[in-house]
Image: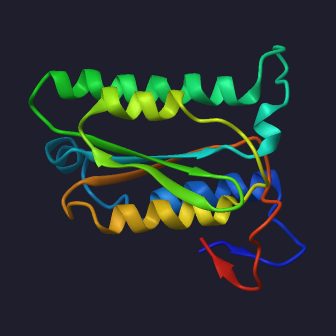
Amino acid sequence: MARLIKNRPLSRVGAVVALVLLLLEGACLSVEAQAASGTDTILVMDVSGSMNDADPSGGRKIDGAKRAGLMVVNAIGQENSLGTIIHRAALVTFNETAQVASPLTTDMAALANRVQAMSPGGNTNIGDGLDKALTLLQGGAGSTQKVVILLSDGLPTTGLRQGAEF
């Protein structure tokens, strides 16, 4: 587990490595078992104030995050339309605190609406967002592959505690 130390946030590379380790922690299933059991995917999306800033293309960061989130939701919906394996997804948004904007569902149209409705404001508490995602995954079906996708523009600015784990 990665640890966040007060006043010493992880570097960008460290945060990415921590997320990859988090994703790989439960990746012990064979490819066949993963395909046969479906997935529970949690989109963890930053809605802090900095997401209202311009990105390099001149658009707002939140709009790029929404496009990326919708690409994931649409891909899951297309896979579900085949009817052979059921995949679920959820949306967790975070600024100072994390909120479950949509619990695990197979209704990708409703999930897409929740992604579109996001608006930025406040500080960045990535740890709380990841914590909510893990809580959702623990409540999911035991046979599904667990996936967390973090969409954020930076490092945590609030919520850091001595010895906090994510």
**Lateral position of residue 66 relative to residue 145, left or right:** right
Q: Horizontal and vertical percent for residue 48?
A: 74, 46
The residue lying furthest to the bottom in this view is 162
**Res. 106 image quadrant:** top left
Q: Horizontal and vertical percent for residue 165?
A: 62, 77
Q: Horizontal and vertical percent for residue 146?
A: 35, 54
Q: Horizontal and vertical percent for residue 34?
A: 23, 47
**Res. 137 image quadrant:** bottom left
**Lateral position of residue 56 relative to residue 82, left or right:** right
Choose between 3 and 61: the one closer to the eye: 61
Q: Quadrant of the N terminus?
A: bottom right
Residue beneath the point at 18% across and 44% down: 32
**Lateral position of residue 137 relative to residue 16, left or right:** left
Residue beneath the point at 74% across and 29% down: 61
Choose between 93 and 31: the one closer to the eye: 93
Above or below, 29 against 81 in this view is below
